[in-house]
Amino acid sequence: MIGHQTLFAARMSGYRPADVWVACVPAGQRYGSFTHPEAMIGRMTNGRWVGHAEIHIHDDENVAALDLRPVVGTVVHLMAPTKTRAFQVLRRLMECSPAKVIASGDWGMAIWQPGASIEEFPA
């Protein structure tokens, strides 16, 4: 998993994102200096935060072992290649108190909010 370390540090420094993007990607993904998830948010010299928070979860990672606490209170936009993987990650995200999770992929879409069940919208 990558992208979470920068998000942790930013949140500890006062950054309060409304949204966080979580993408399930193959291991070994190549990134450029502007596309790496750890480089997606930053602080300007005037103290203003820029960019958008993004976390990438590798397909071979055990979801139960992931530390997804930086999503607390945010709307999470989850992109997953399969419904099975989406629901694995969605259930883990639900444990981390997001405001809402919107999962999508070629398989369809699912939405969850605290106090409600998961709504599914097949493709």
Image (cartoon, helix red, strand yellow):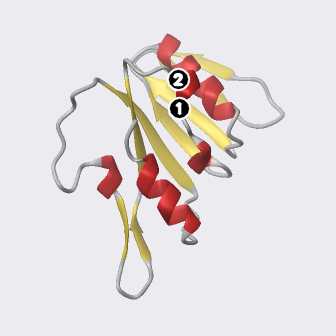
Task: State the image quarter where residue 52 is shown.
Answer: bottom left
Report the residue at 62% width, 33% height from top: 93
Q: Amino acid at mark 2?
A: Val
Badge 1 crowding class, 10 Å Cα cut-off, few under 14, some 14 to 19, many 20 or more, is some
Q: Are marks 2 and 1 in contact (CB under 8 Å)?
A: yes
The answer to whether residue 123 shows anywhere in this view is no
Q: Above or below — where is 40 with respect to 120?
A: below
Q: Amino acid at mark 1?
A: Leu
Which of 56/114 is in front?
56
Distance of label 2 from label 1 (alpha carbons): 5 Å
Pinpoint residue 64: horizontal percent, then vertical percent.
58, 23
Residue sticking out furthest to the bottom: 46
Which of 45/84 is in front?
45
Q: Above or below — where is 5 with respect to 86?
A: below
Element assignment for label 2 = helix
- 4 on left or right of 36: right
Residue sticking out furthest to the right: 115
Which of 72/19 is in front?
72
Name the residue tied to disc 1.
66
Viewport quadrant of the N terminus:
top left
Report the residue at 21% width, 28% height from top: 28
Element assignment for label 1 = loop
Report the residue at 35% width, 79% height from top: 44
Badge 2 crowding class, 10 Å Cα cut-off, few under 14, some 14 to 19, many 20 or more, is some
- 21 on left or right of 91: left
Name the residue tied to disc 2.
63
Pinpoint residue 116: horizontal percent, then vertical percent.
80, 30
Pinpoint residue 65: horizontal percent, then vertical percent.
55, 27
